[in-house]
Image (spheres, helix red, strand yellow):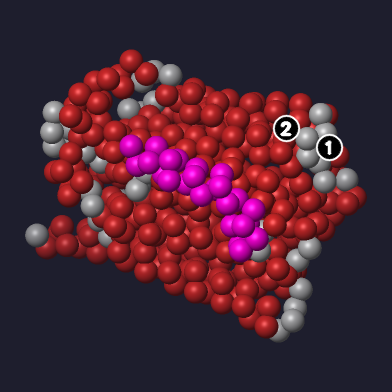
Amino acid sequence: MLAKLKARLGQGGFARNVATLAGGAAVAQFLPVLFTPLLTRLYSPADFGVLTQFVAWLSNLVVIATWRYDMAVVLPEEESDAMRLMVLALLFNTLLLAVLSIPLLAAGPWIATRLHAPAMAPWLPLLPLGIWVAANNQIWTNWNNRQRRYSANAQGRMGQSAAMVTVQLAAGFGKLGALGLLLAQIAGQTASWLLQARQDWRALPQWLRTARAGGMGRILRRYREFPLVNTPHAFVVALQDSLMVQLLGILATAELMGHYGLVVRVLKLPAALLGQAVSQVLYRDLAEAHAKGHSLRPLLKKALLVLSALAIVPFLIIMAWGGPLFAFAFGEQWRDAGQIAATLTPSFFCMFLAAPCFMVPMVLSRQRQSLLFALLGVVVNLGSLGVVYWAGENAHQVFRLLSVTVSIYYIIYMVWVFRLCRQLEQDHAHS
Protein backbone atom coordinates (compact mmCIF):
# COMPACT_ATOMS: atom_id res chain seq x y z
CA MET A 1 0.00 0.00 0.00
CA LEU A 2 2.83 2.38 0.85
CA ALA A 3 4.51 1.58 -2.46
CA LYS A 4 1.28 2.31 -4.29
CA LEU A 5 0.94 5.66 -2.50
CA LYS A 6 4.52 6.61 -3.44
CA ALA A 7 3.87 5.62 -7.05
CA ARG A 8 0.73 7.75 -7.24
CA LEU A 9 2.43 10.78 -5.71
CA GLY A 10 5.61 10.37 -7.66
CA GLN A 11 4.10 10.91 -11.12
CA GLY A 12 5.67 13.99 -12.69
CA GLY A 13 7.21 16.67 -10.54
CA PHE A 14 4.21 17.25 -8.29
CA ALA A 15 5.44 15.23 -5.32
CA ARG A 16 8.96 16.64 -5.60
CA ASN A 17 7.70 20.23 -5.73
CA VAL A 18 5.25 19.65 -2.89
CA ALA A 19 8.01 18.05 -0.85
CA THR A 20 10.24 21.08 -1.45
CA LEU A 21 7.62 23.58 -0.29
CA ALA A 22 6.06 21.43 2.41
CA GLY A 23 9.51 20.53 3.73
CA GLY A 24 10.46 24.20 3.83
CA ALA A 25 7.20 25.07 5.55
CA ALA A 26 7.67 22.25 8.06
CA VAL A 27 11.21 23.34 8.93
CA ALA A 28 10.05 26.96 9.06
CA GLN A 29 7.33 26.08 11.54
CA PHE A 30 9.59 23.84 13.60
CA LEU A 31 11.66 26.79 14.80
CA PRO A 32 8.77 28.86 16.23
CA VAL A 33 7.21 25.79 17.85
CA LEU A 34 10.58 24.70 19.24
CA PHE A 35 11.13 28.03 20.96
CA THR A 36 7.50 28.68 21.94
CA PRO A 37 7.95 27.09 25.42
CA LEU A 38 10.64 29.69 26.08
CA LEU A 39 8.68 32.52 24.48
CA THR A 40 5.62 31.80 26.61
CA ARG A 41 7.83 32.44 29.62
CA LEU A 42 9.32 35.64 28.19
CA TYR A 43 5.99 37.13 27.08
CA SER A 44 2.63 37.30 28.84
CA PRO A 45 -0.69 36.08 27.40
CA ALA A 46 -1.64 39.78 27.04
CA ASP A 47 1.43 40.35 24.84
CA PHE A 48 0.36 37.49 22.60
CA GLY A 49 -3.13 38.98 22.59
CA VAL A 50 -1.76 42.22 21.08
CA LEU A 51 0.14 40.21 18.47
CA THR A 52 -3.03 38.29 17.62
CA GLN A 53 -4.96 41.50 16.96
CA PHE A 54 -2.08 43.05 14.99
CA VAL A 55 -1.73 40.00 12.75
CA ALA A 56 -5.52 39.84 12.26
CA TRP A 57 -5.62 43.44 11.05
CA LEU A 58 -2.50 42.97 8.92
CA SER A 59 -3.92 39.82 7.32
CA ASN A 60 -7.17 41.63 6.59
CA LEU A 61 -5.49 44.51 4.75
CA VAL A 62 -2.65 42.66 3.02
CA VAL A 63 -5.12 40.86 0.75
CA ILE A 64 -6.22 44.18 -0.79
CA ALA A 65 -2.72 45.68 -0.97
CA THR A 66 -2.01 44.37 -4.49
CA TRP A 67 -5.61 44.22 -5.73
CA ARG A 68 -4.74 40.50 -6.09
CA TYR A 69 -2.86 41.07 -9.33
CA ASP A 70 -0.06 39.03 -7.78
CA MET A 71 -2.38 36.01 -7.83
CA ALA A 72 -2.81 36.44 -11.60
CA VAL A 73 0.96 36.33 -12.24
CA VAL A 74 0.85 32.55 -12.70
CA LEU A 75 -1.74 32.64 -15.50
CA PRO A 76 -0.40 34.52 -18.60
CA GLU A 77 1.28 32.57 -21.37
CA GLU A 78 3.56 35.51 -22.21
CA GLU A 79 6.33 36.37 -19.75
CA SER A 80 5.97 40.05 -20.59
CA ASP A 81 2.35 40.01 -19.36
CA ALA A 82 3.46 38.42 -16.10
CA MET A 83 6.01 41.25 -15.71
CA ARG A 84 3.25 43.82 -16.20
CA LEU A 85 1.20 42.12 -13.50
CA MET A 86 4.18 42.26 -11.14
CA VAL A 87 4.54 46.00 -11.74
CA LEU A 88 0.82 46.53 -11.09
CA ALA A 89 0.97 44.56 -7.84
CA LEU A 90 4.02 46.48 -6.61
CA LEU A 91 2.50 49.86 -7.52
CA PHE A 92 -0.79 49.22 -5.74
CA ASN A 93 1.03 47.88 -2.68
CA THR A 94 3.20 50.99 -2.41
CA LEU A 95 0.16 53.21 -2.90
CA LEU A 96 -1.59 51.54 0.04
CA LEU A 97 1.52 52.10 2.19
CA ALA A 98 1.30 55.84 1.51
CA VAL A 99 -2.47 56.02 2.00
CA LEU A 100 -2.49 54.18 5.33
CA SER A 101 0.59 55.77 6.88
CA ILE A 102 -0.83 59.29 7.19
CA PRO A 103 -4.02 58.57 9.22
CA LEU A 104 -2.42 55.89 11.39
CA LEU A 105 0.49 58.16 12.29
CA ALA A 106 -1.77 61.16 12.89
CA ALA A 107 -4.74 59.53 14.64
CA GLY A 108 -3.71 56.03 15.73
CA PRO A 109 -5.07 56.26 19.31
CA TRP A 110 -8.41 57.69 18.13
CA ILE A 111 -8.80 54.90 15.53
CA ALA A 112 -7.90 52.20 18.07
CA THR A 113 -10.46 53.55 20.53
CA ARG A 114 -13.21 53.62 17.89
CA LEU A 115 -12.40 50.00 16.98
CA HIS A 116 -12.61 48.95 20.65
CA ALA A 117 -8.94 47.95 20.62
CA PRO A 118 -7.19 50.43 22.96
CA ALA A 119 -4.26 48.05 23.49
CA MET A 120 -3.39 48.51 19.79
CA ALA A 121 -3.10 52.31 19.98
CA PRO A 122 0.71 52.52 20.42
CA TRP A 123 1.39 50.01 17.66
CA LEU A 124 -0.84 51.13 14.77
CA PRO A 125 1.93 53.20 13.09
CA LEU A 126 3.76 49.89 12.50
CA LEU A 127 0.80 48.43 10.59
CA PRO A 128 1.39 50.04 7.11
CA LEU A 129 5.01 48.87 7.04
CA GLY A 130 3.96 45.39 8.13
CA ILE A 131 1.35 45.25 5.36
CA TRP A 132 3.77 46.52 2.69
CA VAL A 133 6.46 43.98 3.55
CA ALA A 134 3.98 41.09 3.85
CA ALA A 135 2.43 41.97 0.48
CA ASN A 136 5.85 42.11 -1.21
CA ASN A 137 6.53 38.69 0.28
CA GLN A 138 3.25 37.46 -1.18
CA ILE A 139 4.00 38.99 -4.60
CA TRP A 140 7.31 37.15 -4.93
CA THR A 141 5.83 33.91 -3.68
CA ASN A 142 3.55 33.92 -6.72
CA TRP A 143 6.32 35.04 -9.09
CA ASN A 144 8.58 32.21 -7.94
CA ASN A 145 5.63 29.87 -8.26
CA ARG A 146 5.33 30.89 -11.92
CA GLN A 147 9.06 30.34 -12.42
CA ARG A 148 8.89 26.99 -10.57
CA ARG A 149 11.45 28.31 -8.11
CA TYR A 150 9.91 26.40 -5.24
CA SER A 151 13.22 26.16 -3.43
CA ALA A 152 13.37 29.98 -3.25
CA ASN A 153 9.94 30.05 -1.62
CA ALA A 154 11.00 27.33 0.81
CA GLN A 155 14.16 29.28 1.69
CA GLY A 156 12.04 32.38 2.23
CA ARG A 157 9.83 30.56 4.72
CA MET A 158 12.84 29.25 6.62
CA GLY A 159 14.47 32.68 6.65
CA GLN A 160 11.22 34.19 7.91
CA SER A 161 11.09 31.83 10.87
CA ALA A 162 14.77 32.23 11.72
CA ALA A 163 14.56 36.04 11.68
CA MET A 164 11.29 36.10 13.60
CA VAL A 165 12.49 33.77 16.36
CA THR A 166 15.81 35.60 16.69
CA VAL A 167 14.10 38.97 17.17
CA GLN A 168 11.48 37.49 19.50
CA LEU A 169 14.15 35.99 21.75
CA ALA A 170 16.30 39.13 21.77
CA ALA A 171 13.29 41.37 22.45
CA GLY A 172 11.97 38.96 25.08
CA PHE A 173 15.20 38.99 27.05
CA GLY A 174 15.22 42.78 26.56
CA LYS A 175 11.76 43.00 28.17
CA LEU A 176 10.20 44.79 25.17
CA GLY A 177 6.86 43.02 25.65
CA ALA A 178 4.31 43.30 22.84
CA LEU A 179 6.58 45.61 20.81
CA GLY A 180 9.13 42.80 20.54
CA LEU A 181 6.55 40.41 19.10
CA LEU A 182 5.40 42.99 16.53
CA LEU A 183 8.95 43.87 15.45
CA ALA A 184 9.68 40.16 15.08
CA GLN A 185 6.61 39.74 12.88
CA ILE A 186 7.82 42.48 10.52
CA ALA A 187 11.42 41.25 10.59
CA GLY A 188 10.35 37.75 9.60
CA GLN A 189 8.29 38.96 6.63
CA THR A 190 11.15 41.22 5.51
CA ALA A 191 13.67 38.36 5.61
CA SER A 192 11.34 36.12 3.61
CA TRP A 193 10.75 38.79 0.97
CA LEU A 194 14.45 39.57 0.52
CA LEU A 195 15.35 35.89 0.21
CA GLN A 196 12.61 35.19 -2.32
CA ALA A 197 13.36 38.27 -4.43
CA ARG A 198 17.15 38.14 -4.44
CA GLN A 199 17.31 36.62 -7.96
CA ASP A 200 15.18 39.40 -9.46
CA TRP A 201 16.69 42.71 -8.34
CA ARG A 202 18.54 43.11 -11.65
CA ALA A 203 15.36 42.29 -13.57
CA LEU A 204 13.32 45.13 -12.05
CA PRO A 205 14.39 47.73 -14.68
CA GLN A 206 13.31 45.33 -17.44
CA TRP A 207 9.90 44.92 -15.77
CA LEU A 208 9.49 48.70 -15.65
CA ARG A 209 10.52 49.09 -19.31
CA THR A 210 8.02 46.40 -20.29
CA ALA A 211 5.25 48.20 -18.38
CA ARG A 212 6.11 51.58 -19.93
CA ALA A 213 6.16 50.04 -23.41
CA GLY A 214 2.36 49.63 -23.25
CA GLY A 215 -0.20 46.90 -22.75
CA MET A 216 -1.08 47.84 -19.17
CA GLY A 217 -4.66 48.73 -20.11
CA ARG A 218 -5.10 45.35 -21.79
CA ILE A 219 -3.78 43.58 -18.69
CA LEU A 220 -6.08 45.58 -16.42
CA ARG A 221 -9.08 44.56 -18.52
CA ARG A 222 -8.08 40.94 -19.02
CA TYR A 223 -7.55 40.26 -15.31
CA ARG A 224 -10.23 42.61 -13.98
CA GLU A 225 -11.88 39.78 -12.00
CA PHE A 226 -8.94 39.79 -9.60
CA PRO A 227 -9.49 43.33 -8.27
CA LEU A 228 -13.26 43.32 -8.80
CA VAL A 229 -14.12 39.84 -7.48
CA ASN A 230 -11.12 38.08 -5.98
CA THR A 231 -10.09 41.07 -3.85
CA PRO A 232 -13.53 41.36 -2.18
CA HIS A 233 -13.52 37.58 -1.75
CA ALA A 234 -10.12 37.54 -0.02
CA PHE A 235 -11.04 40.60 2.02
CA VAL A 236 -14.27 39.03 3.21
CA VAL A 237 -12.46 35.86 4.28
CA ALA A 238 -9.79 37.86 6.13
CA LEU A 239 -12.41 40.22 7.58
CA GLN A 240 -14.20 37.22 9.00
CA ASP A 241 -11.09 36.29 11.00
CA SER A 242 -10.54 39.90 12.08
CA LEU A 243 -14.12 40.34 13.22
CA MET A 244 -13.93 37.08 15.10
CA VAL A 245 -10.87 38.35 16.96
CA GLN A 246 -12.65 41.65 17.68
CA LEU A 247 -15.79 39.92 18.95
CA LEU A 248 -13.74 37.50 21.02
CA GLY A 249 -12.08 40.55 22.51
CA ILE A 250 -15.53 41.66 23.70
CA LEU A 251 -16.57 38.22 24.92
CA ALA A 252 -13.26 37.18 26.43
CA THR A 253 -10.43 38.52 28.55
CA ALA A 254 -7.03 39.58 27.18
CA GLU A 255 -5.63 36.39 28.71
CA LEU A 256 -8.01 34.18 26.76
CA MET A 257 -7.16 36.15 23.61
CA GLY A 258 -3.53 35.30 24.30
CA HIS A 259 -4.47 31.61 24.62
CA TYR A 260 -6.26 31.76 21.28
CA GLY A 261 -3.23 33.53 19.77
CA LEU A 262 -0.99 30.66 20.90
CA VAL A 263 -3.35 28.15 19.26
CA VAL A 264 -3.15 30.13 16.02
CA ARG A 265 0.64 30.22 16.31
CA VAL A 266 1.29 26.53 16.92
CA LEU A 267 -1.65 24.92 15.11
CA LYS A 268 -3.60 27.06 12.66
CA LEU A 269 -0.69 28.91 11.03
CA PRO A 270 1.46 25.79 10.48
CA ALA A 271 -1.56 24.01 8.99
CA ALA A 272 -2.30 26.98 6.75
CA LEU A 273 1.31 27.25 5.58
CA LEU A 274 1.56 23.56 4.72
CA GLY A 275 -1.77 23.77 2.90
CA GLN A 276 -0.52 26.81 0.98
CA ALA A 277 2.65 24.92 0.02
CA VAL A 278 0.58 22.28 -1.75
CA SER A 279 -1.71 24.96 -3.19
CA GLN A 280 1.18 26.90 -4.73
CA VAL A 281 2.35 23.85 -6.67
CA LEU A 282 -1.20 22.90 -7.57
CA TYR A 283 -2.14 26.41 -8.80
CA ARG A 284 0.57 26.32 -11.49
CA ASP A 285 -0.30 22.74 -12.49
CA LEU A 286 -4.04 23.46 -12.57
CA ALA A 287 -3.51 26.47 -14.85
CA GLU A 288 -1.45 24.35 -17.25
CA ALA A 289 -3.93 21.46 -17.19
CA HIS A 290 -6.87 23.78 -17.86
CA ALA A 291 -5.06 25.48 -20.74
CA LYS A 292 -4.50 22.04 -22.32
CA GLY A 293 -8.10 20.91 -21.72
CA HIS A 294 -7.14 18.21 -19.21
CA SER A 295 -9.23 17.10 -16.23
CA LEU A 296 -8.51 18.94 -12.97
CA ARG A 297 -9.94 16.35 -10.59
CA PRO A 298 -6.92 13.99 -10.60
CA LEU A 299 -4.68 16.87 -9.49
CA LEU A 300 -7.10 17.82 -6.73
CA LYS A 301 -7.42 14.25 -5.51
CA LYS A 302 -3.64 13.91 -5.41
CA ALA A 303 -3.36 17.11 -3.37
CA LEU A 304 -5.99 15.97 -0.88
CA LEU A 305 -4.21 12.63 -0.54
CA VAL A 306 -0.94 14.41 0.29
CA LEU A 307 -2.60 16.70 2.82
CA SER A 308 -4.53 13.88 4.49
CA ALA A 309 -1.36 11.83 4.89
CA LEU A 310 0.44 14.81 6.44
CA ALA A 311 -2.29 15.85 8.85
CA ILE A 312 -4.38 12.99 10.14
CA VAL A 313 -2.12 11.73 12.96
CA PRO A 314 -1.05 15.13 14.41
CA PHE A 315 -4.60 16.44 14.40
CA LEU A 316 -5.97 13.32 16.11
CA ILE A 317 -3.31 13.59 18.84
CA ILE A 318 -4.13 17.25 19.52
CA MET A 319 -7.84 16.54 19.48
CA ALA A 320 -7.41 13.81 22.12
CA TRP A 321 -4.75 15.36 24.40
CA GLY A 322 -4.62 19.07 23.61
CA GLY A 323 -4.85 20.33 27.19
CA PRO A 324 -2.14 18.12 28.73
CA LEU A 325 0.16 18.60 25.73
CA PHE A 326 0.00 22.40 25.90
CA ALA A 327 0.44 22.37 29.68
CA PHE A 328 3.52 20.15 29.36
CA ALA A 329 5.06 22.06 26.44
CA PHE A 330 4.29 25.68 27.33
CA GLY A 331 3.58 25.70 31.06
CA GLU A 332 0.51 25.06 33.19
CA GLN A 333 -0.88 28.56 32.56
CA TRP A 334 -1.38 27.57 28.90
CA ARG A 335 -3.53 24.46 29.54
CA ASP A 336 -6.63 26.40 28.51
CA ALA A 337 -5.02 27.05 25.12
CA GLY A 338 -4.72 23.29 24.66
CA GLN A 339 -8.42 22.86 25.36
CA ILE A 340 -9.20 25.51 22.74
CA ALA A 341 -6.89 23.73 20.27
CA ALA A 342 -8.63 20.40 20.86
CA THR A 343 -12.03 22.03 20.30
CA LEU A 344 -11.01 23.76 17.05
CA THR A 345 -9.02 20.85 15.58
CA PRO A 346 -11.82 19.54 13.29
CA SER A 347 -12.25 22.97 11.68
CA PHE A 348 -8.48 23.39 11.25
CA PHE A 349 -8.27 19.96 9.63
CA CYS A 350 -11.05 20.80 7.15
CA MET A 351 -9.44 24.17 6.41
CA PHE A 352 -6.14 22.37 5.77
CA LEU A 353 -7.73 19.95 3.30
CA ALA A 354 -9.72 22.67 1.50
CA ALA A 355 -6.72 24.93 0.80
CA PRO A 356 -6.00 23.59 -2.74
CA CYS A 357 -9.67 23.85 -3.70
CA PHE A 358 -9.56 27.65 -3.41
CA MET A 359 -7.21 27.73 -6.44
CA VAL A 360 -9.79 26.22 -8.79
CA PRO A 361 -12.23 29.17 -9.15
CA MET A 362 -9.32 31.46 -10.14
CA VAL A 363 -8.20 29.04 -12.84
CA LEU A 364 -11.75 28.51 -14.15
CA SER A 365 -12.81 32.19 -13.87
CA ARG A 366 -15.57 31.25 -11.41
CA GLN A 367 -14.55 33.76 -8.78
CA ARG A 368 -18.02 35.30 -8.48
CA GLN A 369 -19.51 32.01 -7.27
CA SER A 370 -16.58 31.57 -4.89
CA LEU A 371 -17.26 35.05 -3.49
CA LEU A 372 -20.85 34.02 -2.75
CA PHE A 373 -19.51 31.04 -0.81
CA ALA A 374 -17.24 33.35 1.16
CA LEU A 375 -20.15 35.65 2.01
CA LEU A 376 -22.16 32.63 3.15
CA GLY A 377 -19.27 31.59 5.37
CA VAL A 378 -19.13 35.04 6.97
CA VAL A 379 -22.88 35.00 7.69
CA VAL A 380 -22.69 31.52 9.24
CA ASN A 381 -19.58 32.11 11.35
CA LEU A 382 -20.38 35.58 12.59
CA GLY A 383 -23.97 34.48 13.11
CA SER A 384 -22.62 31.75 15.39
CA LEU A 385 -20.72 34.36 17.37
CA GLY A 386 -23.84 36.49 17.60
CA VAL A 387 -25.92 33.58 18.88
CA VAL A 388 -23.40 32.87 21.61
CA TYR A 389 -23.15 36.55 22.53
CA TRP A 390 -26.90 37.06 22.82
CA ALA A 391 -27.29 33.81 24.74
CA GLY A 392 -24.86 35.12 27.33
CA GLU A 393 -22.48 32.19 26.90
CA ASN A 394 -18.71 32.39 27.33
CA ALA A 395 -16.00 32.38 24.67
CA HIS A 396 -15.43 28.61 24.94
CA GLN A 397 -18.94 28.08 23.61
CA VAL A 398 -17.95 30.21 20.62
CA PHE A 399 -15.11 27.82 19.85
CA ARG A 400 -17.37 24.77 20.09
CA LEU A 401 -19.96 26.23 17.74
CA LEU A 402 -17.37 27.56 15.29
CA SER A 403 -15.67 24.17 15.09
CA VAL A 404 -18.89 22.63 13.82
CA THR A 405 -20.01 25.41 11.45
CA VAL A 406 -16.57 26.01 9.92
CA SER A 407 -16.03 22.27 9.33
CA ILE A 408 -19.37 21.98 7.53
CA TYR A 409 -18.60 25.08 5.45
CA TYR A 410 -15.27 23.75 4.17
CA ILE A 411 -16.74 20.33 3.38
CA ILE A 412 -19.52 21.93 1.32
CA TYR A 413 -16.97 24.11 -0.49
CA MET A 414 -14.83 21.09 -1.42
CA VAL A 415 -17.88 19.23 -2.74
CA TRP A 416 -18.82 22.28 -4.85
CA VAL A 417 -15.33 22.54 -6.36
CA PHE A 418 -15.27 18.87 -7.36
CA ARG A 419 -18.72 19.19 -8.92
CA LEU A 420 -17.48 22.29 -10.77
CA CYS A 421 -14.57 20.30 -12.20
CA ARG A 422 -16.83 17.43 -13.18
CA GLN A 423 -19.20 19.82 -14.96
CA LEU A 424 -16.25 21.26 -16.87
CA GLU A 425 -15.25 17.76 -18.01
CA GLN A 426 -18.81 17.06 -19.21
CA ASP A 427 -18.88 20.36 -21.11
CA HIS A 428 -15.58 19.50 -22.82
CA ALA A 429 -16.90 16.03 -23.70
CA HIS A 430 -20.05 17.44 -25.30
CA SER A 431 -18.11 20.04 -27.25
Check contact, mark 1 vs mark 2: CB within 8 A.
yes
Q: Nearer the viewer, residue 264 or 154?
A: 264
Based on the picture, tell me whether residue 100 belongs to the magenta stretch.
yes
Question: What residue is pinned by disc 2?
Answer: 168
**Type of the residue with mark 2:** Gln
Can residue 403 be seen here? no
**Type of the residue with mark 1:** Leu
Q: Which residue lies most toward the left here? A: 431
Based on the picture, tell me whether residue 383 belongs to the magenta stretch.
no
Image quadrant containing the C terminus:
bottom left
Residue displayed at 84% across by 37% down: 42
Rendered location of residue 9, percent (x, y)? 44, 38
Label 1 element class: helix
Q: What is the magenta segment's predominant secondary structure?
A: helix
Residue 382 position by quadrant: bottom right
Label 2 element class: helix
Q: Nearer the viewer, residue 305 or 365?
A: 365
Q: Residues within 10 Å of mark 1 (few under 14, many from 20)?
A: some
Q: Residues within 10 Å of mark 2 (few under 14, many from 20)?
A: many
Rendered location of residue 368, percent (x, y)? 30, 64
Residue stretch in magenta: 91-115
Residue displayed at 84% across by 51% down: 334
Q: Nearer the viewer, residue 368 or 407?
A: 368
Question: What residue is pinned by disc 1?
Answer: 42
